[in-house]
Image (cartoon, coloured by chain):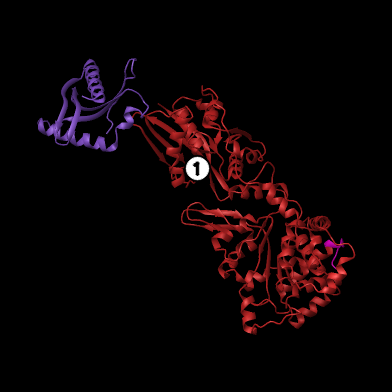
Amino acid sequence: MAAKDELGRWGEQLVAERLTEQGYAVLDRNWRCEQGEIDLVVQRGDDTVFVEVKTRSGTAFGHPFEAITVAKLARLRRLAGEWCEQHGATRRRIRIDAVAVLAPPGAAPTIEHLEGVF
Amino acid sequence: MGVGRTLSVALLGLTGAVVEVESDISAGLPGFVLIGLPDTALGEAKDRVRSAASNSGCALPSHKLTVNLSPAALPKHGSGFDLAIAVSILAAAGSVHAESVERVVHVGELGLDGRLRPVNGVLPAVLAASRAGHRVVMVPTGNADEASLVPDVRVVPVASLRDAAIWHGGEYQPVPVEPIERVGTPEGHEAAAEHLDLTDIVGNEEAIGALLAAAAGAHHVFLLGPPGAGKTMLASRLPGLLPDLEPAEALEVSSIRSLAGLAVGSSLVTRPPLESPHHTATAAAMVGGGSGQIRPGAAVRATHGVLFLDEAPEFSMAVLDCLRQPLESGRISIHRASAVAHFPGRFQLVMAANPCPCGQYGAQDASCMCPPNARRRYLARISGPLLDRIDIQLGVRQVTAAQLALSTDGPRMSTADGRARVTAARAAARERLRATPWTLNSQVPGSWLRNGTAALGGRATAALDRALERGGITMRGYDRVLRLSWTLADLDGEGRPSPDHVGRALFLRRAMS
């Protein structure tokens, strides 16, 4: 596994733990279908939340959020519909969140959470 | 997260409106939205501001940025809003003091390295800010000279965005940068005009007299003569005879130069401008135009100076007739789908023409081969209504060997002497017209000249009355001759025109026929 994939996995794990602490229940992780992958599906109360996690070790190539493009968000939205259909849960309140993990080597990672980005 | 606001100026023609630039930082994925009717150059500000900010060491926050230029309905052009956009975002992010940013008007374009580039039209923009009651203006170092020409405004010149942020209380370390200077040298341009002296003109005494009269009364001039008679030489020496500009005029002339992208320098332009557009000029080049941003044309740049049209019949008739509005009202209004721009257009018109297509008609030592109807058609290209507004119509002849020999001895009038006489004559006219709304003889309407105290009486106007009776001149021409005779009397330092003045005025009017 390439180093960047490892960093991504580690970031997703970190976010899952953080969200669990905040009272979210993790429903699915790295759910895949033909169109792509959803990093995290979590639930709190009535809300089902689809989370895109972006992890970077520095901002030399821009902030992690800058890598989340309109096309990526549109795909996430389609994937969310697909997930709901497969899990027989078409009448849910859904939300799409973005979480950035900035983990510079040798320092504590910082996590930023944006709710309802789409 | 918050809202930052500051001020900038949007120009339409020479009039500026103060624009409020608001920035909002909201929780959302990074993005930059610019709203409020920007044109393409202004829309590109997004990318310039982002790069300039990160290269200045005061990077913009990675959140959703919304910048609004209000009033949103007013069209905004150009790159002069970059500085205002950048500092309002920094204020919204809390990197600089919001109260400090809020009361300052910002004008300037950002380079990708964070330095500030000079922009066109800073003088009218600062003037507009001053008239709207704003007292502090931040401009690029390259525009500092012209911005400080506006009285009662504190000008803050900055070389880079970083300097601007530090001035507004941002905690950054100053980094010295090389300021970007404006290109173009105003001194070279004006020095060239000063070299043209009246003493260079040999043997054309009556033309010099006509030129003095034109300068003293601000009369429009039409010079007609064969090639080589010195028409261009005469016309280019007229601005030198005009007195220095009044302070208000100087500010207007400098503002137009600034708007046209010409260098202004550290002092107001004091000498009247000379514009000589080529005869292939279009209407847009002559009066101004443009579909997006409306730019001033040659006639606007000639305001308070001289507009010289060499080979006037070669201009397209539509272009020549565009000049009728400014000749009548002293203003130029340009209507486009997006807006109407108003410019000042009070210039002195000088036209020069050959008498026929071959140019030799009336010359002593050459014969004209043009058939009469070709000759008539050639001069008919200058429309009657336009010619009607021209007081002095002078025939210029080629200088003969005898005239050249005669003129070598005896003193010739220099431009400085001529300007002194013109200034004295203008002062006399202003004194006489004190109780009226006019200051120059060319502005006085004919009815005022023929009635009341200004009426000259039968003896003085005898020659003129006879010309009118014979049908040699029209009633409108009669008024023009009267106006011109007052100017000639002012030049001679006499209180009222004598029969001699009227006779000379009649000659200046009819010399071309």
Q: Is residue A3 above or below residue B471?
A: above
Q: Amino acid at mark 1?
A: Ser
Q: Quadrant of residue A17?
A: top left
Residue at image coords 54%, 44%: B17
Residue at image coords 64%, 73%: B384
Q: Quadrant of residue A5?
A: top left
Front residue of B487 and B478: B487
User: Would you name the residue on which mark 1 appears?
Assistant: B79
Chain letter tied to purple: A
Q: Is residue B145 magenta?
A: no
Q: Is residue B152 above or below residue B395?
A: above
Q: Magenta part of the protein: which range?
A: B490-497
Furthest-front residue in this view = A2
Residue B416 left/right relative to B268 = right
Residue A52 left/right relative to A104 = left
Chief secondary structure of the magenta portion: loop
Residue A5 left/right relative to A84 = right
